Amino acid sequence: MPDNEQLKVVLVLASNPQQITQVEGFLERLNNQLHLDEVQYNKLLVATTEAVNNGIIHGNKRDPAKKVTLTCVKNHATLIIRVDDEGSGVDPGALPDPLAEENLLRENGRGVFLMRSLMEKVEFEKTAGGAAVVMKMNIEK
């Protein structure tokens, strides 16, 4: 796909943790058009899976009546990944530091840290219907 072409794809999921399995197939179909290398694709897969998982579990509290919407937009050499949920949002500054000694052995609490480590930019927004995380990835070859 040429750099100047724009592409937008959307996946809407019920807030059931089993739905997370759909993310990988969705991203594989997207990558058929983007042709990311293995490292870029794996970064995209991990960060996006974490964001969707957080939306289902923390945002929507696993309420299957609520939806999580994953939107991916390629705009020139940037891929914008947006995950919207119907929850109240998160204050990323209030999250515990996953690298602090007391948190190293915890089984959770690393999702936002991972997203920030893997993406060029991660922002959290309040929306009219809930909250969103917007991640940006440079996909220039």
Image (spheres, rainbow, N blue to C red):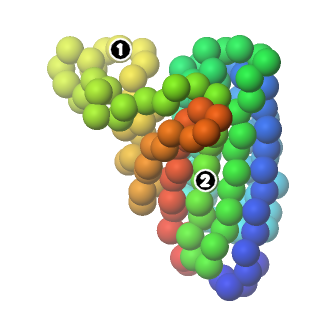
Q: Position of residue 24 (x, y in %)?
A: 73, 41
Q: Which is more foreground, mark 1 or mark 2?
A: 2
Categorize mark 2 by other alpha carbons within 10 Å: few (<14), some (14-19), many (20+). many
Q: Position of residue 67 (x, y in %)?
A: 74, 29
Q: CA distance from mark 1 to mark 2?
A: 27 Å
Instruction: Determine which of the numbered discs, if any, sits on residue 106 in the image.
Output: 1
- Report helix, strand or loop for mark 1: loop
Q: From what the image shows, is residue 140 above or below residue 112? A: below
Identify residue for label 2: 81
Foreground pick, 81 / 129: 129
Q: Who comes first in sequence, dot 1 or dot 2?
A: 2
Quadrant hosting residue 124: top left
Instruction: Give the farthest residue toward the front.
Output: 128
Q: From what the image shows, is residue 139 above or below residue 50? A: below
Which residue is at 51% across, 59% downward?
Answer: 136
Q: Is residue 67 left or right of residue 87?
A: right
Which residue is at 44% across, 50% downward?
Answer: 122
Which quarter of the figure is the N terminus placed in?
bottom right
Which residue is at 64% across, 28% downward?
Answer: 86
Quadrant hosting residue 14: top right
Q: Is residue 14 left or right of residue 99?
A: right
Please name the amino acid that badge 1 sits on. Answer: Arg
Foreground pick, 28 / 91: 91
Please name the amino acid that badge 2 sits on. Answer: Ile
Instruction: Determine which of the numbered discs, if any, sits on residue 42 in the image.
Output: none
Which residue is at 70% across, 51% downward?
Answer: 71
Which quarter of the figure is the C terminus placed in?
bottom right
Categorize mark 1 by other alpha carbons within 10 Å: few (<14), some (14-19), many (20+). few
Answer whether residue 49 is visible to the viewer in this image. Answer: no
Tell me if label 1 and label 2 are in contact, CB under 8 Å: no
Q: Position of residue 121 (x, y in %)?
A: 42, 57
